[in-house]
């Protein structure tokens, strides 16, 4: 390590992360707060002349740009997960008064429930005792960041989010590299968990107006089956999962026969097997379809007879 990076270790870490191809932006020293102004206070001048530049938009992996920024000051490091093609599971420790499990324990339990695995991957520990599990986002997927959507005390950071990179320091501790293995691809079950819609917080089903509910349901099923058939490589899991959820709502509302809907979705999903990295088998298709149908049925779309 050069004298410059020894005197400013964040510079060394930033250059290392940029060399991995990851997109970075500065955080104020000792904090998790990005530099620059918020959208509400954007002056609309300079680099924001055409539109406000978010930290994600300003992020770079150009080593010269990284060096120029971090040589000025020992900034903490923000890793823009979306542009870096990363999906990071942010496993937190329970907060005061929270009796639930820590995030990593909860995620491990969810992996066992869904058939796993939760593979070892690039891991960073946080000052609070949590950990960041870095995964590669599947090709073609555009996952969004979530907050406690997958399971208790687990957030995800993808598009629209960022994580504090290793080498960054807060007043109560630092972010330390715990496992420097290359990040592995985000497991299929975790992709599905990320895109599943949460269970509704209300009991009354939404209602649709149609003179012929059977025809409406059948047309919806044909449309979702066609969407699965036309899914682009890299989006198979997401498309099949959301199609099953959409049809599950109609099954739950009595607009479709469950066996017919399930069989049609599985048949469509099986046409994707072996045409990309996912799905790897027909059993994986069945699992995704069943999970989506079950989740959708919890939020049924009920039918209300249309007046003649």
Image (spheres, grey):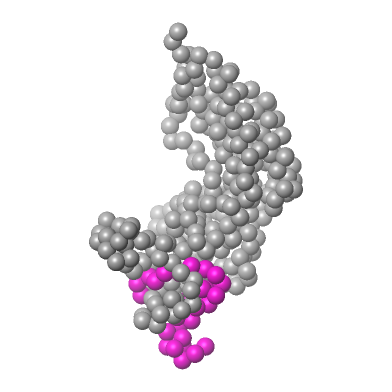
Residue 194: say if magenta: no
The correct choice, above or below, for 258 with respect to 123 in the image is above
Q: Quadrant of residue 196?
A: top right
- Please report the residue visible at 68 percent of the width from the left and 25 percent of the height from the top: 260
For image coordinates 64% across by 22% down, the residue present is 257
Please tell me whether residue 24 belongs to the stretch shown in magenta. yes
From this viewpoint, which residue is outermost toward the top?
Answer: 308
Q: Quadrant of residue 291?
A: top right
**Is residue 201 rendered to the left or right of residue 240?**
left
User: Depth check: 219 or 80 in front?
Assistant: 219
What span is in magenta? 1-29
**Residue drawn at point x = 61 percent, y = 65 percent:** 183
Q: Hey, which quadrant is residue 172 in on the image?
A: bottom left
Above or below, 42 against 200 in this view is below
Residue lying at 43% horizontally and 32% vertically, measured from the top left: 202
Residue 155's x, y, as percent? 48, 55
């Amino acid at each position: 390590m050069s004298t410059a990076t020894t005197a400013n270790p964040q510079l060394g870490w930033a250059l290392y992360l940029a060399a991995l191809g990851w997109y970075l932006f500065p955080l104020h020293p000792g904090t998790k707060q990005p530099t620059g102004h918020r959208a509400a206070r954007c002056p609309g001048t300079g680099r924001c002349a055409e539109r406000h530049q978010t930290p994600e938009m300003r992020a770079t992996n150009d080593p010269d740009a990284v060096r120029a920024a971090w040589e000025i000051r020992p900034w903490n490091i923000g890793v823009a997960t979306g542009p870096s093609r990363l999906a990071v599971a942010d496993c937190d420790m329970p907060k005061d008064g929270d009796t639930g499990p820590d995030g990593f324990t909860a995620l491990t339990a969810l992996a066992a429930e869904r058939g796993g695995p939760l593979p070892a991957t690039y891991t960073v520990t946080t000052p609070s005792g949590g950990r960041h599990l870095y995964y590669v986002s599947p090709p073609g997927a555009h996952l969004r960041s979530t907050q406690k959507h997958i399971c208790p005390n687990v957030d995800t950071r993808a598009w629209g989010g960022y994580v504090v990179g290793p080498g960054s320091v807060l007043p109560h501790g630092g972010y330390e590299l715990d496992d420097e293995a290359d990040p592995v691809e985000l497991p299929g079950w975790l992709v599905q968990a990320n895109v599943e819609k949460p269970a509704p917080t209300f009991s009354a089903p939404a209602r649709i107006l149609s003179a012929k509910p059977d025809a409406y349901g059948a047309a919806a099923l044909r449309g979702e089956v066609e969407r699965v058939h036309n899914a682009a490589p890299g989006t198979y899991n997401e498309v099949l999962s959301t199609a099953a959820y959409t049809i599950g709502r109609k099954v739950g509302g009595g607009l479709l026969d469950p066996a017919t809907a399930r069989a049609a979705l599985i048949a469509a999903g099986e046409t994707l097997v072996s045409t990309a990295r996912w799905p790897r088998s027909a059993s994986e298709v069945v699992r995704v379809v069943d999970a989506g149908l079950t989740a959708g049925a919890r939020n049924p779309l009920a039918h209300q007879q249309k007046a003649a």
